[in-house]
Image (cartoon, rainbow, N blue to C red):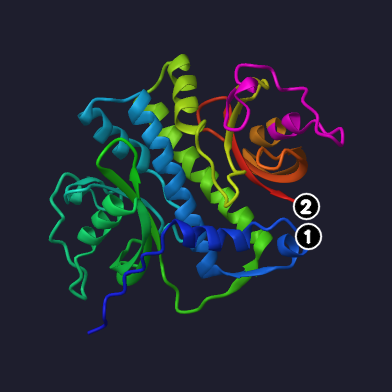
Amino acid sequence: MKKFIIRFTFLFAIVLICGVACKKTDDDHNTGMISQFDSDKIFVSTVVGSTASGFGSVFENFITDSLERIEFCRVYTDPIRYFEDLSGYFFTQNFYGWNIAYPTNKDLEGTYLWDLQDPEGNFFIRTMSEIAKTTGSGFIEYYWDNPATSENEKKLSFVQAISGIEYFIGSGFYIRSTDPTITLLESNKDVSKNLTLSFTEGIVAVFDDIYTDSLDRVEFCRTLLDDIKFWEDNSGYFFVVDLNGYCISHGSNKDLEGTDVYDLQDSKGAYFIRNMITMAENPGYGFIEYYWNNPTTGQDEKKITYVHIIAETDYFIGAGVYIQ
């Protein structure tokens, strides 16, 4: 029997991985390489960390009732899938073995999973809970059904505690038999894209089922997104703008919220908000390159941002990475 491997790769390890992916040199961003395995690790730790941060803000400031929190977790995470084969998804547990949300197997929702074992006999829910309670976040390797193949496969997941509540949220990827390499720029773009898509799908679900009033939607976006930071240097953030150029939410400059940003130009004279609006209208998504202040360095830097329309609204959301 294979020995169960638990990788307590905590915050310092994520910093090391992300530091490799986020160095600010032309060579790193354009010709440096990273394994797909490490790129996937960066993505799952980033999407879980960002979502846990957003949920913590929502639960502190917006949703305080315990039953409403459970419903929110289920509504938000239910439609979210990522990776090319759609095998990526979230799961939410409390610290004591009760499942809160499990989008790919709803029979598990509301059930006690403390004694759940993988085919190798490992009590992985117990280990996840221990990670969340003791260190707050970390990686764990175990075997679990892949919804894309219906086969039991080795999986590496990242879990993180949600502040202010005894819940943790997790997500992972199924480990491939081969490990191709990609450029660091491709990795950073993929992380930005999939991160944005994840939040797009969650927000759409919440708008459909919970917040239908326009003012509630504005407040929800700000509560969910404004305190999220990602990348090793915390230069990553989200923004939401409507198709008329009105700024709904901005994670690095709250002074922009509620203002008309339609005519904003970057240091090269590009009307990048107008370009984002054009792309959000048709085809509805894509990458935009422009120059913008890096909130970490305070410098004007080139940025590649992925934007996506929030379905059935006139909002679009964006997130990106600074390059030089």
Q: Is residue 274 inside the magenta stretch?
A: yes
| Residue at far bottom of view | 1
Marks 1 and 2, how far apart at CA:
6 Å
- The residue under the point 80% across, 29% down is 265
Asked which secondary structure carries label 2, the reply is loop
- Region of the chain picked out in magenta, as a range: 248-276
Asked which secondary structure carries label 1, the reply is helix
State the residue position of label 2: 324
The 10 Å Cα crowd at callout 2, few under 14, some 14 to 19, many 20 or more, is: some
Instruction: State whether the magenta stretch is mostly helix, strand or loop.
Output: loop
Q: Is residue 262 visible?
A: yes
Pinpoint residue 89: horizontal percent, then vertical percent: 38, 52
- The residue under the point 72% across, 60% down is 29
Vertical order, 255 against 116 (above or below)? above
Vertical order, 227 against 133 (above or below)? above
- The residue under the point 70% across, 42% down is 297
Q: Are marks 1 and 2 in contact (CB under 8 Å)?
A: yes
State the residue position of label 1: 26
Callout 1, which amino acid? Asp
The 10 Å Cα crowd at callout 1, few under 14, some 14 to 19, many 20 or more, is: few
Pinpoint residue 114: horizontal percent, then vertical percent: 15, 56
| Foreground of the two, 7 or 76 | 7
Q: Which of marks 2 and 1 precedes in the sequence?
A: 1
Left or right: where 281 falls relative to 52: right
